[in-house]
Image (spheres, rainbow, N blue to C red):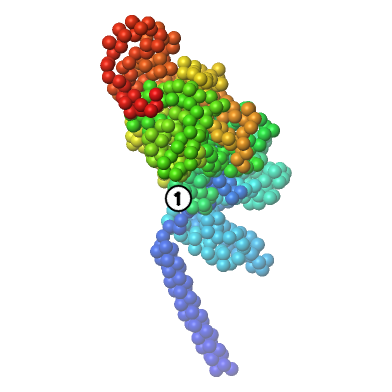
Amino acid sequence: MEIMTDQGFRKTVKYLRAFIIISLIGMICMFLFYISVLAYAKILGAPPLAVTQSTLLYADDGTLIGESNNGQKRYWDKMNEISPDLVQATISIEDKNFYHHHGFDYKRIAGAVLADIEALSKVQGASTITQQYARNLFLEHDKTWKRKLLEAFYTIRLEMNYSKNDILEGYLNTIYYGNGSYGAEAASQYYFGKKAADLTLAEASMLAGIPKGPYMYSPFASMKNAKARQAIILQSMVKNGYITDKQAKKAEQEPLTLVGSHPTQKVKMAPYFQDAVKNALKNQLHLDDRTIALGGLKVYTTIDLKQQAAAEEQTKKYVDPTSNIQVALVAMDPKTGEVKAMVGGRDYEKSPFNRAVQAIRQPGSTIKPLLYYAALEHGFTPSTIMRSEYTTFHFDDGTPDYTPHNFNNKYADGEITLAQAIALSDNIYAVKTHLFLGEDTLVDTAKKLGLSTNMAHVPSLALGTSGVRVIDMANAYSMFANGGKRVHPTLITKVEDYNGHVIYQSETSKEQVLDPAKAFVMTEMLTGVFDPKLNGYATVTGSTVLKDLTRPYAGKSGSTETDSWMIGYSPQLVTAVWAGYDAGKPLELTAEKTYAKNVWANFMEEALQGKPLKTFKPPKGVIGVYVNPLNGKLATKDCPVHRFTYYVKGTEPTEYCTDHLSRDDANELNKKSKEKSPWYKRIFPWGH
């Protein structure tokens, strides 16, 4: 019996020794495993904190005009942009020991484990704020042990590499508050229509209770449950010393005003412009679709909301609502190229096709200023004269005969000046100029002025038979308006990533592509479109909108069988307007041919309302003289019409008009003037 007892004792000692050894080995292995996990976490370094966030678009005054997302509203606020009440309420209810642990609350974990063992399933959570943030960033929300282990590993990495405030900021910006709202800012906007920084204690305490169960504790799901949860949170804040019992009771009784909608759901500003901005982000900044939609970008655009509203209003006002005709408009700041307003069609919901930037249409006579600028470079002046008459052009190279026509088949049947040819939009003058300069000249000039479409080398190119984009034409006219400096259509001034780092900043080009003096002379000739002093065999083409204009403008209208245009500018703003049918249906009604002019004139007036009245300032190298607009010669006191006209210095006329003088007076005057014949009579003897 004693022997058996001794053997049993030795066996017990043996088992105990084995247990101790195994336990020590297990503890050593666990310690080594723990050290390995820490070392591995340290080697991996800080996990990236990038999460999907809404990309926000802002107008030039900082107003939010739209956002790009996948149905989820995600914004990012710094800690100082979130109400302290919401921060304290969240800590109190979610993780009161947040600032005192290293990612895990072991007391809560032990309690949760016992509850899970008792229920034989995963029923209770003890996740800290860091653990929840790790789950929001990297993991799914299924309740499995594998997910918990991975969550623990990411929690370690977060605590090792980020401060408590960084972790808390991330948590508050990623937690789900229901109704598509991720983060405190989106939730504040949705539930209370205000920024997270402006939340009251009552609002903050209710908001902090929603993440536990958005479908149970949202005030829109159950106000009773939401108020009960709010009371619990307020008492936890009292217990943790954040507020007094008096403050808690006051907040609990405070009536709340709920909104229940995201602010950008109400915002549908400039939809065609917003599409163009997203296209620019992709094609000009080379950002991928996911980054554009969910990268948390802040895109600061050029749009002026007042001018955009004016563009949309005038389009609706002057275009027959029962018609299927379409309209496109682009307004730009000529000094910077910044697009201030854009209309791509009459109804975005029915047709998102952006005619302002995508459609290619014949510009008609609005191409002529490009042609005539090239003519100025080749020695023409506003006084250069040619005959305007019914003309058929014959070619020796086999090109078919070409017979252009003026509007209503009206011709001067005599000589007219370049200035008058522009004002009356004489087609014969334009084709003669085009053929004299050579067909390549207009093609090259169009490229220099930023037109991106192909130009055909044909006689009719002078009358705008090759298609262009509205935005390109606005850009080309901007170079006349700004004195010849290169600009590009600019939709975006700055782009910030989700961390606030600037990844793009626009720059204004200072490249001089046109001669400033010739650009100014071109502008001054385009003011003649609105000057009745240039009336001749027809009235100036801008006469129909003169009554609507209150400040100096330069411009040019244009029309083809299927397209109607008006492009014009003041020193502050350039606007191009097109009207026509998508299918190329002819414009047969008289009213349809007036839409572009009326929209342009009234938009310009409204857009510039309240802005200083500016005139076009002559640069160095130009000189102004009074001429008889009918023949381009220096005017005398006897001429019935005097028009002040600018010329590149050295090209101004030297011969006086003698049409209204007696023979003796004419002879005397001509003795005083230069005896040599003007250069253009030597160059163009066939044009007289």
Q: Please tell me which residue is depicted at 42% across the width and 20% down the height of the picture.
A: 615
Left or right, residue 576 beside residue 516:
right
Q: Position of residue 573 (x, y in %)?
A: 46, 28
Q: Answer with the quarter of the image where residue 136 lies.
A: bottom right
Nearer to me, 352 or 42: 352
Picture layout, residue 411 above or below residue 95: above
Read off the residue under disc 1: 286
Q: Please tell me which residue is depicted at 27% across the width and 10% down the height of the picture.
A: 672
Q: Position of residue 76 (x, y in %)?
A: 51, 45
Q: Circle 1: is it few (<14), some (14-19), or many (20+) Cα within 10 Å?
A: few
Residue 470 visible in the picture = no
Residue 362 visible in the picture = yes
Q: Position of residue 362 (x, y in %)?
A: 52, 38
Picture layout, residue 140 above or below residue 583: below
Q: How many discs mark residues in the rendered view?
A: 1
Left or right, residue 270 beside residue 287:
right
Q: Which of the image's four quarters has the N terminus?
A: bottom right
Nearer to me, 33 or 109: 33
Q: Secondary structure at mark 1?
A: loop
Q: Position of residue 587 (x, y in %)?
A: 62, 34
Picture layout, residue 216 above or below residue 605: below
Picture layout, residue 634 above or below residue 425: above
Q: Answer with the quarter of the image where residue 528 lies.
A: top left
Q: Which of the image's four quarters has the C terminus?
A: top left
Q: Please tell me which residue is depicted at 53% across the width and 24% down the height of the picture.
A: 410
Q: Amino acid at mark 1?
A: His
Nearer to me, 482 or 480: 480
Q: Please tell me which residue is depicted at 68% across the width and 50% down the height of the picture.
A: 215
